């Protein structure tokens, strides 16, 4: 067989090396993009396969064509197309073997061998496309194939032994392209230099030089166009992905700086944690990777809580919630968590990304707030059940009242809200009193004092009051809290004690003076009566009668003094108060009718037993009712009532007379104080003393031009 001598064209060789470098660079670039992107993977895969195959075929074509041979045969186009298809097939198998999630060393070797097989097949078929035969040295063939396989294995090993972010560094693609280009070129040189070419036994007619040149330039032009398109596509895709990667890196950096991030596989095994996760959990990264989140379980949440969580993300839905975890040192921390499932093509989660924010301080604040609110609720509950509470705005308008306020004032809450406290003004306190009160609280100071208010039904009540101003940022009150306690009974008791003290003083005075007055008074009365027996002059007799009337009046006063000084023994018996009152009213009925006064008696129960001295109690009732009659010179109505309440018999005598002025009402019952022109004040004083001796209480309410009411409270006697 006749061998054919070969000569090389260096320009064509240089062009071929440049083109294979460009093709390899584009192929590596597209393949690495495919590994780092979830989008357009099919396009990137086909682009990488096509670019690598075309590059190998062009280099092979140019190297063979650069060998000027004698008796060049016609170019076999179908065989050339077959060589391209075989190259695409083996290159596709090699790349497909590398698109798995985990690639082993064995798989790297297999892919390298398929790349080598693609180069070898394209070379051999390229020789036959020119209708040459081929004879190779086995040793050189093995060395060439091994060199090409190593040139493919090294970039693949770098690609899969480093992190994906490292693979995207700028040096990887040109370095890999250089290694692969060098390996393929050197392998071709070895194959070409050691190959023995000879004319094929099936040689067709020779073609002229023009035909060979035209075919060459057409093939070269088409190859360059294809590679240029692949390079442009690769560049555009790369720029888009780099922009996306830049955005993703920015987002990732922002998340790492602000959030606690973890990634787990479908089983919940942790595959990635950022620094903030390590920082808050107190675990090292190596202690977390490969574990599940049970390592952080604080035991606070129930099994149902986590079942619902896994059910949600397992169905591909985003889960949001708050989780309490336990750090390595045992401390508890709270995180606001969002778990995002990433789904594969089958719609099943292949990993979960958890983004958390530390909310421990917020949860502690919420807990403290809850505790504070609980304490405030407890304080409010205690105040509402023990005190009369009202809140007003800075102008004194009522904005809130509790039930006890409504109970004592007899007003409903709706009637009070929006009003000021003038609604309850009893007229007892002076204008200067309230001016001092407002001046005090408006300056931010607390005011304490006693107030007498008037309820809706006209009754009066006393309150021990504390008013607390609440200040705004400018140091001015924006609302006032008034806390009051009912001291009406205390004030009545104080009044009774005051009267008792006065009665005691009068009694001591009476003990020393009564006898000294009565002795000369008896002599005066006797001589005056004696003189009337012999007096014939009517004018002088009238004067003596006047003297006797005045002596009787003085004797009556002395008699009252003697009662104060030495009360008569009381005959205490259990009596039904209703008949007693009826008896007293019958005695005064005629006199009341003469003065055009109606007396009404109302009682709720027919039997109300009390322990009393009947005669002395009648004296008290007669005194009070007579005063009521005298208070209505122009006629009117006296309403007398008796009812049982809180184990006390409540008697009231109310007239519709002129009333008693506020300043005089406080002195009712004091010795020698009277509202009548002819009275001496001892009658009421003695009546109060009698009620006190029965363990009872008396208090008086009055309003000018409306009338006066005397209230008597006596202990109820139960069998």
Image (tube, rainbow, N blue to C red):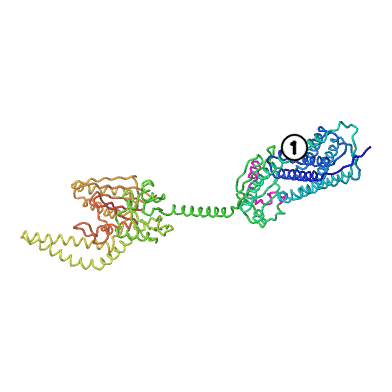
* Residue 173 placement (x, y as % from top left): 74, 48
Position of residue 509 relative to residue 304, above or below, is below
The residue sitting at the right extreme is 1
Q: Is residue 648 magenta?
A: no
> As drawn, is 528 to the left or to the right of 282?
left
Question: Which part of the image, by quadrant, shows the N terminus?
Answer: top right
Nearest the eye: 413 or 291: 291
The quadrant holding residue 100 is top right
* Residue 454 placement (x, y as % from top left): 32, 52
Nearest the eye: 171 or 207: 207
The quadrant holding residue 544 is bottom left
Nearest the eye: 131 or 311: 131
Number of other residues with Cα within 10 Å of mark 1, as a class: few under 14, some 14 to 19, many 20 or more: few
SS at badge 1: helix
* Residue 19 placement (x, y as % from top left): 76, 43
Please provide the residue range marked out in magenta: 289-312
- Visible in this render: residue 493? no
> As drawn, is 51 to the left or to the right of 416?
right
Residue under pointer 1: 222
Q: Is residue 308 magenta?
A: yes
Position of residue 129 relative to residue 699, above or below, is above
Nearest the eye: 289 or 412: 289
> As drawn, is 138 to the left or to the right of 271?
right
The residue sitting at the left extreme is 537
* Residue 213 placement (x, y as % from top left): 80, 37
> As drawn, is 269 to the left or to the right of 659?
right
- Visible in this render: residue 424? yes
């Amino acid at each position: 067989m006749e061998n054919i001598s070969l000569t090389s064209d260096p320009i064509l060789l240089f062009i071929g090396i440049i083109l294979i470098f460009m093709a390899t660079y584009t192929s590596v670039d597209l393949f690495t993009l495919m590994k780092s992107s979830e989008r357009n993977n099919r396009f990137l895969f086909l682009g990488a396969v096509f670019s690598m195959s075309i590059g190998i075929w062009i280099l092979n074509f140019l190297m063979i064509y650069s060998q000027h041979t004698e008796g060049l045969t016609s170019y076999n186009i179908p065989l050339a197309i077959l060589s391209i298809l075989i190259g695409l097939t083996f290159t596709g198998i090699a790349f497909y073997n590398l698109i798995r999630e985990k690639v082993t060393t064995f798989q790297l070797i297999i892919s390298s061998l398929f790349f080598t097989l693609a180069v070898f097949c394209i070379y051999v078929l390229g020789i036959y496309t020119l209708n040459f035969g081929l004879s190779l040295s086995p040793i050189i063939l093995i060395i060439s194939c091994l060199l090409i396989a190593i040139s493919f294995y090294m970039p693949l090993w770098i690609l899969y032994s480093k992190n994906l972010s490292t693979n995207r560094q700028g040096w990887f693609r040109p370095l890999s392209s250089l290694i692969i280009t060098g390996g393929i070129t050197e392998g071709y040189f070895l194959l070409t230099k050691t190959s023995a070419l000879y004319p094929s036994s099936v040689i067709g007619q020779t073609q002229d030089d023009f035909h060979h040149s035209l075919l060459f330039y057409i093939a070269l032009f088409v190859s360059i166009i294809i590679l240029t398109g692949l390079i442009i596509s690769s560049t555009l895709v790369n720029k888009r992905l780099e922009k996306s990667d830049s955005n993703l890196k920015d987002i990732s950096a922002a998340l790492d700086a602000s959030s606690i991030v973890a990634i787990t596989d479908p089983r919940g095994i942790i595959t990635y944690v950022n620094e903030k996760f390590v920082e808050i959990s107190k675990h090292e990264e190596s202690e977390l990777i490969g574990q599940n989140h049970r390592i952080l379980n604080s035991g606070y949440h129930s099994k149902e809580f986590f079942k619902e969580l896994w059910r949600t993300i397992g169905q591909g839905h985003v889960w949001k919630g708050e989780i309490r975890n336990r750090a390595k040192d045992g401390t508890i921390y709270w995180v606001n968590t969002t778990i995002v499932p990433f789904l594969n093509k089958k719609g099943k989660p292949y990993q979960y990304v958890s983004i958390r924010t530390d909310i421990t301080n917020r949860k502690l604040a919420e807990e403290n707030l809850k505790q504070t609110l609980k304490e405030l609720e407890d304080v409010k509950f205690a105040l509402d059940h023990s005190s009369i509470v009202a809140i007003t705005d800075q102008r004194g308008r009522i904005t809130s009242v509790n039930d006890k306020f409504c109970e004592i004032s007899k007003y409903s809450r709706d009637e009070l809200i929006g009003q000021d406290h003038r609604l309850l003004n009893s007229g007892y306190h002076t204008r200067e009193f309230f001016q001092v009160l407002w001046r005090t609280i408006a300056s931010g100071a607390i005011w304490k004092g006693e107030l007498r208010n008037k309820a809706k039904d006209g009754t009066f009540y006393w309150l021990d009051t504390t008013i607390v101003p609440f200040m705004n940022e400018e140091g001015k009150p924006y609302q006032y809290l008034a806390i009051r306690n009912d001291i009406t009974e205390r004030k009545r008791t104080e009044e009774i004690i005051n009267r008792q003290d006065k009665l005691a003083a009068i009694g001591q005075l009476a003990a020393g003076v009564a006898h000294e007055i009565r002795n000369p008074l008896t002599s005066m009365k006797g001589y005056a009566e004696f003189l009337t027996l012999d007096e014939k002059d009517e004018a002088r007799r009238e004067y003596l009668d006047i003297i006797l009337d005045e002596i009787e009046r003085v004797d009556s006063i002395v008699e009252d003094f003697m009662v104060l000084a030495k009360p008569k023994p009381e005959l205490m018996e259990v009596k039904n108060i209703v008949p007693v009152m009826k008896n007293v009213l019958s005695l005064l009925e005629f006199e009341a009718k003469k003065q055009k006064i109606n007396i009404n008696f109302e009682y709720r129960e027919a039997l109300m037993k009390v322990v009393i001295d009947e005669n002395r109690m009648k004296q008290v009732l007669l005194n009070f009712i007579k005063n009521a009659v005298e208070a209505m010179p122009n006629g009117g109505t006296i309403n007398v009532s008796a009812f049982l309440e809180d184990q006390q018999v409540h008697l009231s005598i109310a007239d519709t007379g002129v009333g008693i002025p506020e300043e005089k009402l406080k002195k009712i019952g004091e010795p020698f104080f009277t509202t009548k022109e002819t009275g001496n004040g001892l009658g009421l004083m003695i009546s109060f003393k009698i009620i006190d001796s029965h363990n009872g209480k008396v208090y008086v309410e009055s309003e000018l031009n409306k009338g006066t009411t005397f209230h008597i409270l006596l202990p109820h006697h139960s069998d």
